[in-house]
Amino acid sequence: MLELAVLGLLHESPLHGYELRQRLKATLGTFRAFSYGSLYPSLRRMRDVGWIAEDDGNAEVVAGAPALTGRRGKIVYKLTAEGKERFAEMLTEAGPSAWEDETFGVHFAFFSRTDPEVRVRILEGRRSRLEERREGVRSSLRSTRSRLDSYTLQLQEHGLESVEREVRWLTELIETERRGAPPQQPPAP
Amino acid sequence: MLELAVLGLLHESPLHGYELRQRLKATLGTFRAFSYGSLYPSLRRMRDVGWIAEDDGNAEVVAGAPALTGRRGKIVYKLTAEGKERFAEMLTEAGPSAWEDETFGVHFAFFSRTDPEVRVRILEGRRSRLEERREGVRSSLRSTRSRLDSYTLQLQEHGLESVEREVRWLTELIETERRGAPPQQPPAP
DNA sequence: ACCGCGATGTATCGCCGTGATACATCGGTC
DNA sequence: GACCGATGTATCACGGCGATACATCGCGGT
């Protein structure tokens, strides 16, 4: 989850923790935050298993004073070969884990590096997931509508509309995918 | 959070765990699930601090065989006086904790038992929370739009529209509240 | 020249909720 | 009379969150 996101961002360029978090926010947007409380431990774990490494760049600078003062500089991470492999693997996995609430957004964010067939499968998986949920809400609403106070009803209906909207969005995306060209890409003249 | 929800549901009628979870799903809808993994421990804690109690109803039945077989029946919980107090207190708290993502839905679900002024304050708090987020996304979008691939862009814009929709919904609710009558309630003739 | 302050930067900790799993009972159906 | 899905209670490892701590940097104000 977080790991996939980190791998994906580091795939573009080496980054340090703070930057990583900014990019996370900018890339995932409203969808998910990811606090430092999960980011730093995650970075440590990924470093320990060797998917990422500290990129000390060119450490040709003075080697005396900094050490004495306990000076702590930025810690820049970059992908290792293993990390790249792992990232590629993760992008081909189109199982349920790819279309759950928490996961889908991250997978989607890296769709431009995902195989077209996998993309469609994930989008469809996500859609049926939401369709199930929609039916659940609908039937629950049918059977309990009269018993609910107006606020609860309001909440239910707002939720239902959100899901419906999401389904429409996915349907459009799927059609676009099927049509061949991902968003814009006019055929060569 | 879960505690508020449980208190609110038990306020209507005594329930056992399984039922509680069904009601949770039906009441909160798409908004939040709450698994047994949090429900049962929470019930235990709330019982320990005395907000709820096991309602053994009329235990006038046979007292022999069941005990011998280690028979485990339903465990029905009901609110204690303390629990009712605590619930009332929670409903008057209109702080940031009431309009965060995870919390808002639960508070909203019990609006019919919440003071009108508190309702408006929570709705407004929620709205400004979302407006902040919206501005964040917008400015991040303004400054990075050109650098984003079409999928990331798609995700951003979908997220932005979701937030905008939510804000509109809240604005309508606030206006309805201000107009006096919570959804339906004609003034006495 | 100095102070303060907000942004940058790394890190930890307790809390809460999830999803998987286990296990037992009950009411039907074939 | 055997099976099965719904009902019912419970636990555990795991992941992420929010608060918090602390240090540095660059900047504007006086």
Image (cartoon, coloured by chain):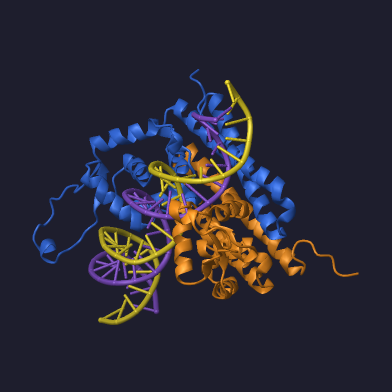
Chain colours: A orange, B blue, C purple, D yellow
Q: Write the residue at 50% across / 42% down.
A: A153
x, y percentage for residue B154? Answer: 69, 55
Query: A34 or B182: which is nearer to us?
Result: A34
Q: Which quadrant holds residue A110?
A: bottom right
Q: Which residue is at the far left?
A: B64
How many labels sit on residues? 0
Foreground pick, A19 / C9: C9
Against B63, residue A93 (above or below) is below
Measured as percent of width and height from the top left, residue B122 is found at 48, 33
Residue at 9%, 57% (x, y): give it: B63
The location of residue B184, given as percent across then percent down, is 52, 30
Residue A128 seen in render: no
* Image point (58%, 63%), residue name: A60
Q: Is residue A95 left or right of residue B3?
A: right
Instruction: Specify whether residue B28 is in view.
Output: yes
Going by the image, does A166 lie left or right of B186?
A: right
Residue B65 versus residue B78: which sits nearer the camera? Answer: B78
**From the viewer's perspective, is residue B110 above or below residue B141?**
above
Residue B162: x %, y % from top left: 62, 47
